Amino acid sequence: MTPVFNFAALRHETLCCNRCGFCQATCPSYKETKDESNAARGRIRLIRAVIDGELPITEGYIRRIEGCLYCLSCVSACPSGVRIDKIILAAREHYVSAKGLPWAKRLALRQVLPANGRISLASASLRIAQKTVLRLPGADRLVPKGIDVRHLPTTFRSLRRRLPALNTVSHPRGHVVFYAGCLVDYTMPAIGESLVRVLNRSGVEVALSRSAQCCGLPMLVAGDTEAGKLLARRNIALLAEMGGDAVVTACASCGHALKELYPYVFRGDPAMQAAAESLSARTFDISAFLVDQLGFRSGESGFLASSVTYHDPCHLLRGQGISAQPRLLLREIPGLEYREMAEAGQCCGAAGFFQALCPDLSTAVSNKKVKSIADSGAEYVASSCPACLQRIQGSLNLAGLRKKAVHVVQLLDRAGQGLNVVKTGQKL
Amino acid sequence: MVSRAIIQELQAAAGKGAVTFSPEDLIVYSYDATMPEYRPDVVVFPQSTEQVAAIMRVANEHRLPVVPRGAGTNVSGGSLALEGGMILCLSRMNRILEIDRENLVAVVEPGVVNAELQAALAPLGLFYPPDPASMNVCTIGGNVAENSGGPRCLKYGVTKDYVLGLEVVLPTGEVIHTGGSVMKNCTGYDFTRLFVGSEGTLGVVTKITLRLLPLAEAKKTMLAVFDSVVDASSAVSAIIARGIIPTTLELMDRILLRCAEDFVHVGLPKDAGAVLLIEVDGFRESLDGQMRQIKAVCRANQARELRHARTSKEVDDLWLARRTVIGAVGRLEPNYGLQDVTVPRSKLPIIVEEIGDISAKYDLPIGVLAHAGDGNLHPIVLFDARRDGDLAKVHAAEKEICKAALALGGTLSGEHGIGLSKREYLPMEYGPIEMSLVARLRKVFDPNGILNPGKIVAGGIV
Ligand code: SF4
Ligand code: SF4
């Protein structure tokens, strides 16, 4: 496969690390292991060693680069402005093109995720397993440690089979396309249903992208750039064709892919880059869309007697620079008490396939999150990413805490139930 | 190279998982926050004093060089494995063993991160004053080894003023205890102070007893903006001469202001010649009076603007800018040489002017960052190692800065230590007798010369 990133050209970027070490303070993999080769600074140095031929691509090298959760904490903490994320992506692509993908990843990234039918089948099969084999004593041995596979959300009916292609309202004030992404579509359709209801109640009609595909982020961060780009191309074309005032997402990682990664991977291809940038400019996380584009005020949207804390997904907080809007929405829900947790911006430990590949590290990171949530004393933990919600809910379950992890739009939806206000405001 | 037999002995001493010699690990333990790199032969991560003692016995028997280190944020090359051998990484000995509120004392292991200790103390209304810019990552063990300072050391003093006692493993493997939890101690020599600032050359510190202070009731933070760096430093000398000791008096010149602002985006005046970051703390009622006096001095020294931080967010932003600025110079040039000269406080304006002259003479940008109230400067020479000739020029410029400071009655290092980077300058400050005393003293503790060989003064394994 032809590399997308010019690996050798990154040498300059690796040299911009002046080794202050400040990234240790934020890097979850360093904080757990206290091992320099698991910190951003160490990874950058190892990558330079490979670029310079000082180190061949060893298994130990791959393991250390794979140990990065792509949480972007180092990127925002680095005083020198080193783009560690881009260096990591390039390094992964480099060794994947040299050594290929391990079979399990290959199966997931090349066979399952690019084919919607197979994702649906996978979700349904897991659901059957949850109701059968996973109930058997000793089934624990079958599943990765630290992940509550028995209660992972699964469904027989995906969002695209639950909802019509166009969810309209009378006299719509706007028309948006909802890019649901695999996890919402095939495992947590309730988030999508809530999102559609909240937008409909605000007078906005919502089209679902029925043939939309996986956003490609899992491939891009795994170093299978070619597979990721293929999906990116299809989504860019499809979403351009669907038009609308905006594209909204409810998944922080999908949003990060559409907004940030698509334009990046098509650098050097002017036509595609322009198309990617135009999609990027009209893609919004749902909280940002509600607050910034729609002027949505949850204060006028019902009542919910409870308390909530908020977890910042890495790919929303640092991946898209959004933290105020979801908090504003939660704070304004009448009856709902908002409690900020400690270190809300710390990674939840999920990091996609990372949790299955590095279960101990992932669980250690996740348990810190669980502690922050428990200490906040809130009943609900809200977030903006289905991947975080699944991991957090699982870790809460395993810790024996009876708290619910929900998407921000689910709380907005619940608070607004019974209300049927269609706001006839300005056109978008 | 370390033989398989030695590796096995080390594994027996520290546990199998605590010893690594894989190429990946050796590469990442070959550097600290300075430029040079030296690959160790083995890296060991002990988790107890007993393990450290056992490791030292193995190393001593086999004449294996040992370089103790924590987070690897050393800015004088002190944690580099100059002669190969072993990196003894103490980051995993990171327990806070005790916080004694009645005696205002804490006992910690060396791998505890400075900020983690502060975080544990703050809810109890206590703090540990030394606050190096790298406090979010650097370890207390490293702070002890380097006798680290920080902005608020102007009012509160440096690490050595807070270390009451130590547990130390000697290079020969014996464990000794110095000092204790008492506030006064006049029994025999002050071994504690001898180890503090010894840069990992006399022993491996495994337990540290620290003096704590109650947090001040309130503080006020202000940014004084000047058109010229010389005016700013004159203001510093004048404040001190008036007998006013604020908590911090930090100086950043234009080069650094620009780098800092490009990272933190908090509205620092990028067109100013320099700023002073001034903080006072104490009883609420006393603060306004102190600030009033300081402001008057600043105005008399041509301050063009005095900005108060109004919210705690504004205070945090200013400090974030200050703490990260050395790293942020990476935005201008990939490499920097950081000096740490210290002059009598009245000489600050003179040395600042001289640094300006040296910068012009060598045609190298030199940023001036200073714990100005202490007369402790961090001139930062910016360069790009890939451009030919720069390196020699950089060294010449640095040497001249050191000379200038010494001529003013100053010293080479205020808080970073000599390590490797300033080793060649030491004979400018030490005479032959002092130089030989250093070597002789080391021999008393470390007859085989295995501990951090080649640091402070040249010399290696005996
Ligand atoms: S914070 Fe940035 S410059 Fe500093 S060590 Fe980490 S990557 Fe390098
Ligand atoms: S992205 Fe996260 S896990 Fe990866 S190096 Fe940076 S801080 Fe560490």
Image (cartoon, coloured by chain):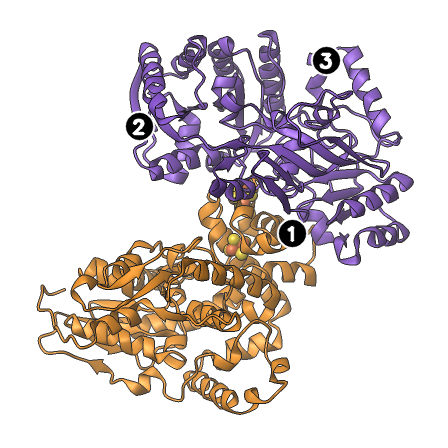
Q: Position of residue B451 (x, y in %)?
A: 80, 34
- The chain holding disc 2 is B
Query: Residue B217 sits in which quadrant?
Result: top left
**Residue at (60%, 59%) from the top-left corner?**
A65
Chain in purple (letter): B
Tell me the residue at 64%/29% (across/down): B163
Of residues B87 and B240, the one drawn nearer to the viewer in this rendering? B240
Q: Which element carries disc 2, helix, strand or loop?
A: strand
Q: Chain of mark 1?
A: A
Label of residue B308 in the image: 2
Callout 3: CB less than 8 Å from ligand 1: no
The image quadrant where one finds the C terminus of chain A is: bottom left
Mark number, residue B430: 3
Q: Amino acid at mark 2?
A: His
Tell me the subunit letter for badge 3. B
Q: Which chain is orange?
A: A
Q: Kindly indicate whether the residue at mark 1 contacts the one at mark 3 (C-beta within 8 angstroms).
A: no
What residue did someone put label 1 on? A35
Q: Is residue A225 above or below residue B36?
A: below
| Image position, residue A152 (x, y; %) | 47, 79
Across and down, in percent, residue B317 comes to: 38, 37
**Amino acid type, label 3:** Tyr
